[in-house]
Image (spheres, grey):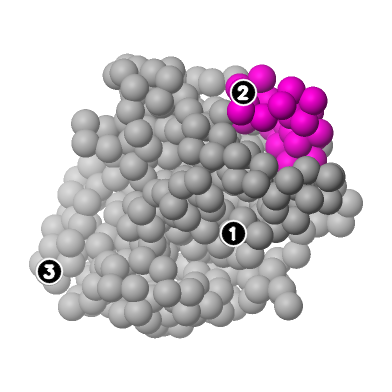
Amino acid sequence: MPSPGELTFVAPRGAKKPPRHLADLTPQERREAVAEIGEKPFRAKQLSQHYFGRLAHRPEEWTDIPAAARGRLSEALLPELMSVVRHISCDDDATRKTLWRLHDGTLVESVLMRYPDRVTMCVSSQAGCGMNCPFCATGQAGLDRNLSTAEIVHQIVDGARALRDGEVAGGPARLSNIVFMGMGEPLANYKRVLGAIRRLTDPAPEGLGISQRGITVSTVGLVPAMHRFADEGLSCRLAVSLHAPDDELRNTLVPVNTRWTVREVLDAAWRYADVSGRRVSIEYALIRDINDQGWRADLLGRLLKGRRAHVNLIPLNPTPGSKWTASRPEDEAEFVRALETHGVPVTVRDTRGQEIDGACGQLAASQR
Ligand code: SF4
């Protein structure tokens, strides 16, 4: 049965299926796939060890597998999923954005952000996005297709390898956090995103062994999928892209709000917080004279007061040719103060990557 998100937001007609890959499969399915091509089942574990444990996806690196078998295994389980179109660095090379071309020519992007105490990777879960938020470059271009589990995972495996190999300034490092905040609405591609979370968090060699607590999944508020996500029993963080505290404005800024209201979205968020024990992150892009008025800050404060929530204010990174722009500094400061008056924890997000078209989707949009 399709997930609640997929019931509503199906992939567009004509989308080509990505090739099957090791990272799409559970350990049992990997054993079966290896047996299908006449190899011993233990090769599945060797391949997993190479891909997830050693971050080595090229057959020439698999020296414990006979050369004759490597080509067959690679073709069946580790086909080339994507290639780098280009990397762009900024913030003194502490931020690196990668534009990928998938097997069918579709473009997606991921971003590695290095901080003094952690390294965060922002990944795409769909090519494009069907949510149509008017201030967002990705939303303007529409949805191309869902990414497969392996297409999501491979962005991260490659990022982890680049970090380990010292390709990102600051010397070799390990990936500590993953945020599903790149292109797409993760909960509209529910099954594949869930599969990716399993691959990322399963202990090596079956997965990457990353802590669930280091993973953040963002949503515009697909309420049935949020409830389903709560029922998975995970301890990932949930981030809700709210952007307005009132239905009237949110109906225009986040059109899916006409389907599920602010009240319903927040109720689902509080349920997730209760079940997971994690504070929910409320994402709010501050847009000049649109959603940054004092009365809206006050309303937001009243909605969140006493809840297990933290507000992340995002100074909007204007998209080229757009009428939407970032709030004035004094309005931003006043917004923060109003939330603090209600005792709501709030931070203003560090806007990494602005000089490299950092708002979600802009790099891919500029290639179209
Ligand atoms: S803001 Fe997020 S949900 Fe809205 S269109 Fe852009 S990518 Fe999609």
Label 1 near ligand 1 (CB < 8 Å): no
Which one is closest to the eye, mark 1 or mark 3?
A: 1
Question: Can residue 139 be seen by looking at this rendering?
Answer: no
Q: Is residue 81 left or right of residue 288?
A: right
**Going by the image, does 337 lie left or right of 111?**
left
Which tag, 1 or 3, sits closer to the chain's start? Answer: 1
Q: Which residues are magenta?
A: 57-84
Query: At label 1, which amino acid type do we have?
Result: Gly
How crowded pointer 3 is (Cα within 10 Å; few <14, some 14-19, many 20+) is rated as some
SS category of the residue bearing label 3: loop
Q: Amino acid at mark 3?
A: Gly
State the residue at coordinates (83%, 51%): 36
Label 1, residues with CA under 10 Å away: few <14, some 14-19, many ≥20: some
Choose mark 2 or mark 1, whichever is in front: 2
In the foreground, 325 or 171? 171
Please give the label number shown on residue 343.
3
Task: Identify which residue is drawn at 43% across, 20% down.
Answer: 165
Q: Position of residue 116 (x, y in %)?
A: 21, 31
Q: Is residue 74 magenta?
A: yes
Q: Which residue is mark 2?
A: 63
**Badge 2 or badge 1: first in the primary sequence:** 2
Snapshot quadrant of residue 295: bottom left
Give the quadrant of residue 124: top right
Quarter of the image for residue 75 reads top right
- Does 281 sit above or below residue 110? below
- Name the one closer to the observer, 224 or 44: 44
Work out whether mark 3 precedes mark 2 in sequence or the reverse, and give the earlier one: 2
**Mark 3 or mark 2, whichever is nearer to me:** 2
Q: Tell me the kind of residue under disc 2.
A: Thr
Question: Dot 2 lies on which element?
Answer: loop
